[in-house]
């Protein structure tokens, strides 16, 4: 009797286990087709969140960056594949990937591994982001430094070595020198430049320019420190065209064109090299699957990287025409002293009649 009672209890336990949904290991083991989709999408440097949504974890999920990535087939069972991120195998049903500025998409749903009870996108309120930089207090030091220089820095929390420290100091000095140089060249309402933590790898204009510390760190780690100048000039294009009330201020291709012509007109040989580098980098990036995802889900406004490369290469090969075209935009907003210098020894692309007319009207 005791034996049958024990077997009955065990049977009830097994039934309860079998009929209760199990949230563990939904897509821990994947097939080759899913593995190929994941390998074509994930890459080092991406940001992810690991969160078991059906488990209703109480702990706030943290954002982590992919440092190491390995997608491999089991040595013991053919056809069984695993995804290892940062030296730990993961269940991709619970991996959400940052596809554009705090929008995290479920990797399991995207790859087609068939997870259940998980959202396509993770609600942002679940994610812990690094704090944003507070506005500087309106004290005397703020008035003397921030208001005059229009550049505000939130220090990097970790500087790994002396080379990184020198890079950060160079960037700070370059931005502090750049703003007054811009004021000596162009006429525009004041704006501010922020270097701060944003919770995303990005830069943007509103029309104040923000360079995110996350972006600075990522470019440094990828040995692409020179890319920051291109990024800044791209955002500067958005800012100045907006302050000058031009209709294409929010067009990404127009901002790329601004950055290119600015480098041609005021950057010297090093400026031209930066433009050539940008074309090369955009071409070698192109086109990662992430770009297609952004186009579908988040209305990404940048052209595909390969098209940005083609654009810059075209502008490089048509430098004179590009300068002549943009001179008509720049002339009404150039400082008088700059216009006069243009007439002292005019370059082939300078429309002297246009410059003289502007000077006469001032």
Image (cartoon, rainbow, N blue to C red):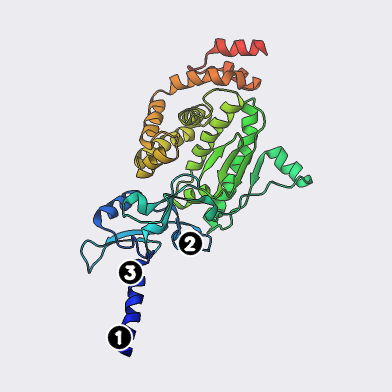
239 horizontally vs 251: left or right: right
Q: CA distance from mark 2 to mark 1?
A: 38 Å
The mark that comes first in sequence, 2 or 1, is 1
The quadrant in which residue 243 appears is: top right
Q: In this figure, which residue is indicated by the disc labeled 3?
A: 18
- For the C terminus, give its image quadrant: top right
| Neighbourhood count class around disc 2 (C-alpha, 10 Å): few under 14, some 14–19, many 20 upward | few
Asked if 70 appears above or below 213 in the picture, the reply is below
Closer to the observer: label 1 or label 3?
1
Asked if 349 appears above or below 227 in the picture, the reply is above
Q: Please provide percent x and percent y for residue 213.
A: 55, 49
Q: Secondary structure at mark 1?
A: helix
Q: In this figure, which residue is indicated by the disc labeled 1?
A: 4
Residue drawn at (26%, 58%), measured in percent from left and top?
31
Q: In this figure, which residue is indicated by the disc labeled 2?
A: 56
Determine whether label 1 and label 3 are within 8 Å by CB: no
The answer to whether residue 127 of the structure is visible from this angle is no
The mark that comes first in sequence, 2 or 3, is 3
Q: CA distance from mark 1 to mark 3?
A: 21 Å
Judging depth in this view, the residue of 32 and 305 nearest the camera is: 32
């Amino acid at each position: 009797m005791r034996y049958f009672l024990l077997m009955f209890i065990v049977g009830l336990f097994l039934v309860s286990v079998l009929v209760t949904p199990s949230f563990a290991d939904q897509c821990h083991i994947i097939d080759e087709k899913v593995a190929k989709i994941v390998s074509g999408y994930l890459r080092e440097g991406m940001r992810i969140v690991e969160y078991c949504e059906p488990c209703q974890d109480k702990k706030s999920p943290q954002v982590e960056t992919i440092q190491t990535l390995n997608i491999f087939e089991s040595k013991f069972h053919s056809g069984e594949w695993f995804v290892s991120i940062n030296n730990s195998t993961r269940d991709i049903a619970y991996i959400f990937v940052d596809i554009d500025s705090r929008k995290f998409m479920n990797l399991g749903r995207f790859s087609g591994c068939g997870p259940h009870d998980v959202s396509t996108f993770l609600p942002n309120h679940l994610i812990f982001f690094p704090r944003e930089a507070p506005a500087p207090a309106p004290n005397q030091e703020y008035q003397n430094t921030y208001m005059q220089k229009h550049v505000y820095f939130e220090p990097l929390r970790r500087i790994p070595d002396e080379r990184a420290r020198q890079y950060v100091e160079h960037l700070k000095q370059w931005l502090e020198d750049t703003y007054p140089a811009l004021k000596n060249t162009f006429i525009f309402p004041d704006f501010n430049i922020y270097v701060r933590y944003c919770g995303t790898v990005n830069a943007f204009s509103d029309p104040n320019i923000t360079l995110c510390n996350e972006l600075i760190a990522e470019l440094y780690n990828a040995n692409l420190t020179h890319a920051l100048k291109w990024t800044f000039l791209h955002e500067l294009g958005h800012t100045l065209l907006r302050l000058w009330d031009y209709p294409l201020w929010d067009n990404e291709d127009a901002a790329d064109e601004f950055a290119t012509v600015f480098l041609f007109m005021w950057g010297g040989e090093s400026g031209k090299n930066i433009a050539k580098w940008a074309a090369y980098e955009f071409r070698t990036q192109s086109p990662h699957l992430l770009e297609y995802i952004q186009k579908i889900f988040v209305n990404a406004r940048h052209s595909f990287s390969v098209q940005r490369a083609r654009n810059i290469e075209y502008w490089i090969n048509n430098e004179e025409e590009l300068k002549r075209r943009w001179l008509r935009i720049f002339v009404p907003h150039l400082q008088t002293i700059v216009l006069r210098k243009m007439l002292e020894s005019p370059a082939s692309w300078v429309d002297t009649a246009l410059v003289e007319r502007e000077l006469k009207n001032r």
